[in-house]
Amino acid sequence: MKAVVRTRYGPPEVLRLADVPTPAPKGNQVLVEVRAVSLNASDWESLVGRPAYARMGGPFRPPNRILGSDIAGRVVAAGRHVTAFGPGDDVFADILLSKGGFAEYVCVPQTALAPVPAGLAYEEAAALPQAGAIALRGICGKAQVQPRHQVLINGAGGGSGMYAIQLAKLNGAEVTGVDNAEKLEFMRSLGADHVIDYTRDDFTASGRAYDLILDLAAHHTAFAYRGSLRPGGRYLCVGGSVATLLQVLLAGPVLGRAEGKKIRVLGVRQGVQHLASLVGLIQEGKVVTVIDRRYRLSQVPEALRYLGEGHAKGKVVIVAE
Ligand SMILES: NC(=O)c1ccc[n+]([C@@H]2O[C@H](COP(=O)([O-])OP(=O)(O)OC[C@H]3O[C@@H](n4cnc5c(N)ncnc54)[C@H](OP(=O)(O)O)[C@@H]3O)[C@@H](O)[C@H]2O)c1
């Protein structure tokens, strides 16, 4: 089969399209013919090996030759212990830990799979796993966004932000989206009431305060975030610089306690089976998935460069020929 492989960390130039053996499913795995795989910031981070947490599985050499984790496709074979799926089933999955989606076929444990939801195309199902899980957990989890809450989403022009803006608006919040200048209009089109260009303005220095800050690209200090929260507000981050994540992890629980502020790293539950409520909203037409660009498997390096250089608005998806 064809797959996009790499043997070291580096820019998109380290990737090449190669012929590799088609994997055989083990007992509890199915072999999926990949019809669509969406890109995430995690793919870029694993490609270049930055921030440092992207090298956790292999400090010097990447553990995964083939990247790509949010997949949708058709089951073509199943291991002998597989009971829930069979050849011909349309499925989607988040395979962040094992990866391998930038290929014609990939083996996936049956526990990671769910049927492609009715009415969704492969590319829409592939857009959902990581971005949807982060947005759901960030907006509808413990944060419990309420009507008229002031919500700021930092990094809101990417995949997770696309869903997060819409979910916050559906909950009645007043939403501020932060991203680079190219994505301001995009964030407005999703419903953001206010937008900030992070390359020009620092939201932590604006004097405004929020009930919830969902941070997809944390780079400020935990003290700065505390200053941007209303009393009782929550700051939740899922990605960013290691220094900031460590500071939030270690100092967050004590900072702001006196004012009832919560400053935390948000743990996201992996697994497409947790996405049912978001899928329902998409099926009802209340939330949309915006696919900025589609690329072929051979164009994965170009697609990752587009994402990594900061142009992608919503999702970028690799679709099968
Ligand atoms: N906690 C977990 O379990 C978990 C699981 C999966 C992923 N993640 C993390 O979740 C994060 C978001 O993922 P995603 O797929 O939504 O990413 P994405 O689609 O790339 O979106 C991130 C957005 O943040 C913007 N950005 C970058 N630096 C910024 C800054 N300093 N201030 C404001 N915005 C900035 C990016 O714009 P530019 O294009 O300008 O860079 C991009 O539009 C990633 O950091 C990823 O590692 C966490």
Image (cartoon, grey):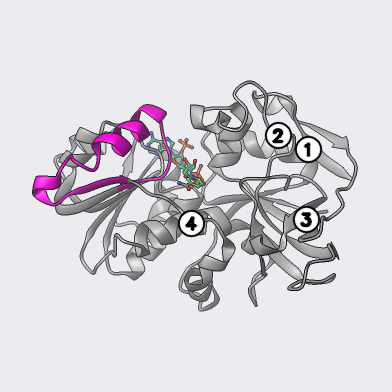
Give the CA distance from mark 2 to mark 4. 29 Å
Q: Could you say which disc has been placed on residue 4 in the image?
A: 1
Q: Is residue 183 visible?
A: yes
Q: Secondary structure at mark 1?
A: strand
Q: Is residue 141 left or right of residue 319?
A: left
Give the CA distance from mark 3 to mark 2. 18 Å
Figure quadrant of the N terminus: top right
* Magenta region: 236-264
In the image, residue 244 lies in the stretch drawn in magenta? yes
Task: Indicate which disc, 3 or 1, sits on the residue closer to the N terminus.
Answer: 1
Which mark is in front, 4 or 3? 4
Disc 3 to disc 2: CB gap under 8 Å: no
x, y percent for residue 55: 57, 29
Task: Indicate which disc, 1 or 4, sits on the residue closer to the N terminus.
Answer: 1
Disc 3 to disc 1: CB gap under 8 Å: no
What residue is shown with label 2? Answer: 301
Query: Which amino acid does the dot numbered 2 rest on?
Result: Pro
Q: Is residue 190 visible?
A: no
In this view, the residue in front, 23 or 128, is 23
Disc 2 to disc 1: CB gap under 8 Å: yes
Q: Is residue 116 left or right of residue 183?
A: right
Q: Could you say which disc has been placed on residue 34 in the image?
A: 3
Disc 1 to disc 4: CB gap under 8 Å: no
What residue is shown with label 4? Answer: 269
Which mark is in front, 1 or 4? 4
